[in-house]
Amino acid sequence: MTGKIIEKVGFFTLILATILVLAILGVILYDILAKGAGVISWEFLTQPPRRGMTEGGIFPAIIGTLYVSFITVLFSVPLGICTAIYLNEYATKGRLTRMIRLAIRNLAGVPSIVYGLFGVALFVQIFKFGTSVLSAGLTLGLLTLPWTITASEEALKSVPFSYREASLALGATQWQTIRSSVLPYALPGILTGVILGLARAAGETAPILFTGVAFFLPHLPKSLFSQFMALPYHLYVLATQHHAIERVRPLAYGTALVLIVLVLSLNSVAIFIRYYLRAKDKKGRG
């Protein structure tokens, strides 16, 4: 009887905590939507800022965010997936492998400002990329790399070992087994982790603060070695550093709404891809 009471109390506590979190999130989203929706217009989305960012739009910030995100994907996704494949499929189980996994998980918890300072030292100063789109994208790539490796490795671990045994028994090599039997099954989980990591990177300010983002740049980057504007830093400036904060506050809410929509869109893509690939895999195996 006591066990049932404890179970009900615990279940009620979990429901209450969930409702509380959703309520707080709902209030925040409603506030941003109510104050930012009136700012959203075609001009706001397609025009550069004017008059010290007190007028115009956020088009350079949107494009700059997409540029940096694209470089982040190119850098972190292939390297992260290959690392996960090696650790899960090829690496010998032992102390060294455990230490590597522990280091990767610790890196996933390092504050983003540390990655920003490391990016300055490595990409801006040592590699001489300067404060640029390339430096910022590679820094965000380092930020999302531990996340990508961990998510990819967990997806690979979810593949039943019998799939590998069946493929090897038919005479396939280990790489053929990984390519044709393991990766297709693990792909939904891998892509979900990748997109969620990218969504996190798209909203980061600290790593790009020192590596290439500009305060006010009303034109698009001319090359990978140019400075750029980005939505997170643009929002930070409008909300805390602008000389006319009250005047630009509606623009800040509009920028926040666009950034939230971008992140939610990436998350929605991850969910769609996950369910689509799982349904396709079940259909193919059925």
Image (cartoon, rainbow, N blue to C red):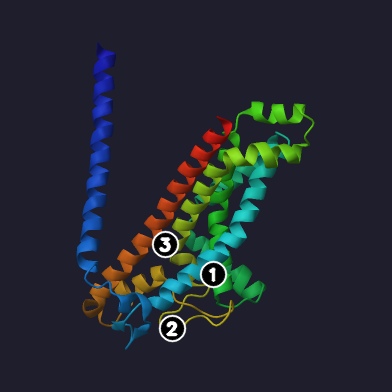
Q: What is the spatial separation of the Cα atoms under label 2 and label 1, in whole angstroms? A: 16 Å
Q: Residue furthest bottom?
A: 51
Q: Secondary structure at mark 2?
A: loop
From the image, tell me which residue sits under label 2: 217
Q: What is the spatial separation of the Cα atoms under label 3 and label 2, in whole angstroms? A: 19 Å
Asked if 123 appears above or below 281 in the picture, the reply is: below
Q: Earlier in the sequence, mark 1 or mark 3?
A: 1
Give the class, few, some or many, for how many residues have Cα within 10 Å of label 3's Cα (few <14, many ≥20): some
Residue 153 coordinates in the image, percent (x, y): 59, 41
Residue at 58% x, 31% y is 285
Q: Please state, as top left, top right, bottom left or bottom right, where the N terminus lies in the image.
A: top left
Query: In this orientation, which residue lies closer to the viewer: 145 or 89?
Result: 89
Q: Please state, as top left, top right, bottom left or bottom right, where the C terminus lies in the image.
A: top right
Residue 272 coordinates in the image, percent (x, y): 44, 47
Q: What is the spatial separation of the Cα atoms under label 1 and label 3, in whole angstroms? A: 13 Å
Query: In this orientation, which residue lies closer to the viewer: 2 or 48?
Result: 48
Image-quadrant location for residue 49: bottom left
Regarding residue 97, the answer to whether it shows in the image is no
Residue 277 coordinates in the image, percent (x, y): 52, 42
